[in-house]
């Protein structure tokens, strides 16, 4: 039986929960606290908070948002966006996060992955990868929410990141993100084939049934859901039912 | 004015994020003190040993802060002690993480890596991250333990690469299954208990375990 973790992803800009398409054209949805609490009450397995502009502007509101969430939300929280150092990671963990997700700073300084993993354990160090397809079976890693190319091949980069100490991979398809066209299952499979750490598929979930292919074909360990939940097109209960009917192990 | 809730001391020895443990206990009505002060810890009616990270580092910190004898002393005088995650592993005799390191030895047993392969030979993902169901380990009753309000099948959030196995199966209260292997999830011996998962990250069912510890 395949186990599947159901994760709500909250993209944050300033104090707001936002959502874009292809990680751009950001639209304000509302209060992150309200949405997060709703997902917790619906039985979400984890939350991911991503500050989508932090790597552009430096400072962010995440520590505040996370520390508020930690008051009444008792499931794991992964936080990313603008984490550039072990100290940044420490701050966000102290605010109540359980894991940090790092993209831009890891590309600039891959050893940061090792430093964070050594300090807090690899289970704390999530490598966040934004992937854009460049050809059949080929994807390039991007940073800054799909704006900046890195020249890195996604598969090579993920393998290297895991060797350096990443304990989990948050794999976002920039091509699918916000499109509701379903996950990029080929991308997910290409990555899960190569690494042994858990992979979270992100980007493109349009309906609850989309989890079926990304688990069966992509071998995803977890799915990150955003606008399907934010716009109430489905509840976590709906997704859980589809997953359970398909025989996947999901939390009761 | 409401009466202060049952008191719990969370040992702060510089390892990991204690905020969630504090908030979890506060949420179920406890008055929480997070401290590394030896006298304060000894004066507590019940004590939590949290922990995230590497076993050797955690033991070194306990040693440097001279908290090892404090923990032994409070256990000897019957104070309930609850280890969470790495805190549970520290209760045993020794760990194989980065060479052999001695633990607190409050429950006989060893900490070993989770097997790299499932029983069917398929590679297992390590660390074991995610929700997993508790099952009874043997004949040990859950009544009067931290699991008194918990039912088999309750799912908890695990994040770990090593497993803590008591030598005597009577000290093993609950397991979870991973890749066909049975991994100890809750252990207990008299006033000492521990859980491998994070009750403070396991939703309402996890909070139930924290609530139960307040009655110990």
Image (spheres, coloured by chain):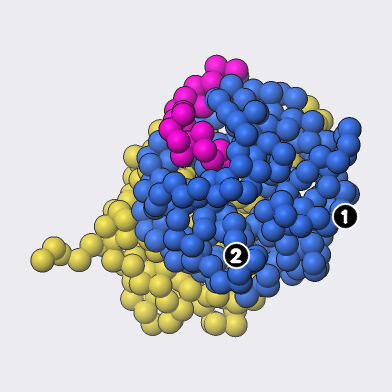
Chain colours: A blue, B yellow
A57 vs A174: above or below: below
Q: Which residues are magenta?
A: A224-246
Count residues near mark 2 (Cα–Cα under 10 Å), then give few for <14, some for 14-19, many for 20+. Answer: many
- Residue at 32% x, 56% y: name it: B27
Task: Kindly give the residue lying farthest to the left in the view shown.
Answer: B1
B61 vs A26: above or below: below
| Disc 2 to disc 1, C-alpha distance | 22 Å
Task: Kindly give the residue lying farthest to the front in the view shown.
Answer: A25
Q: Give SS at disc 1.
A: strand
Whether residue B90 is visible here, answered yes or no, is: no
Where is residue A119 drawn, in percent x and y? 68, 69
Residue in front for this viewpoint, A111 or B167: A111
Q: Pointer 1: what residue?
A: A151
Q: Earlier in the sequence, mark 2 or mark 1?
A: 2
Q: Pointer 2: what residue?
A: A54
Where is residue B17 drawn, in percent x and y? 52, 66
């Amino acid at each position: 039986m395949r186990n599947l973790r159901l994760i709500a992803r909250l993209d944050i800009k300033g104090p707001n929960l936002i959502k874009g398409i292809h990680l751009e054209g950001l639209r304000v949805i509302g209060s992150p606290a309200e949405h997060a609490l709703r997902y917790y009450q619906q039985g979400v397995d984890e939350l991911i908070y991503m500050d989508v502009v932090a790597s552009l502007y430096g400072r962010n509101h995440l520590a505040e948002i996370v520390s508020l969430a930690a008051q009444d939300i008792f499931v794991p929280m992964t936080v990313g966006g603008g984490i550039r150092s072990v100290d940044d990671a420490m701050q966000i963990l102290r605010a109540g996060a359980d894991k940090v997700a790092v993209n831009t700073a890891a590309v600039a300084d891959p050893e940061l992955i090792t430093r964070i993993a050594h300090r807090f354990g690899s289970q704390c160090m999530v490598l966040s990868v934004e992937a854009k397809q460049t050809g059949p079976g080929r994807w390039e890693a991007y940073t800054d929410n799909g704006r900046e190319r890195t020249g890195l091949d996604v598969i090579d980069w993920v393998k290297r990141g895991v060797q350096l100490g990443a304990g989990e991979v948050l794999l976002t398809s920039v091509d699918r993100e916000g499109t509701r066209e379903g996950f990029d299952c080929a991308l997910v499979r290409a990555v899960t084939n190569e690494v042994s750490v858990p992979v979270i598929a992100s980007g493109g979930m349009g309906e609850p049934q989309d989890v079926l292919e990304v688990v069966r074909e992509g071998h995803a360990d977890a799915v990150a859901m955003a606008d399907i939940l934010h716009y109430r097109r489905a509840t976590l209960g709906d997704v859980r039912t589809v997953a359970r009917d398909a025989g996947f192990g999901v939390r009761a | 004015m409401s009466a202060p809730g049952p008191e719990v001391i969370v040992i702060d020895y510089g390892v990991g994020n204690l905020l969630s443990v504090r908030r979890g206990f506060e949420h179920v009505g406890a008055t929480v003190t997070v401290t590394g002060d030896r006298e304060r810890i000894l004066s507590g009616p019940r004590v939590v040993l949290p922990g995230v990270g590497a076993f050797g580092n955690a033991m070194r910190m306990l040693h440097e802060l001279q908290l090892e004898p404090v923990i032994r002393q409070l256990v000897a005088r019957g104070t309930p002690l609850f280890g969470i995650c790495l805190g549970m592993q520290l209760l045993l005799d020794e760990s194989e993480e980065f060479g052999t390191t001695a633990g607190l030895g409050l429950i006989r047993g060893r900490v070993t890596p989770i097997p790299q392969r499932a029983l069917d030979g398929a590679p297992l993902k390590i660390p074991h991250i995610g929700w997993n169901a508790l099952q009874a380990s043997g004949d040990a009753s859950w009544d009067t333990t931290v699991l008194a309000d918990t039912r088999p099948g309750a799912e908890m959030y695990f994040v770990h690469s090593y497993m803590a196995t008591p030598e005597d199966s009577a000290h093993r209260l609950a397991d979870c299954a991973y890749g066909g292997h049975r991994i100890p999830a809750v252990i207990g011996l008299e006033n000492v208990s521990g859980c491998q998962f994070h009750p403070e990250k396991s939703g309402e069912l996890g909070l139930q375990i924290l609530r139960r510890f307040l009655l110990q």
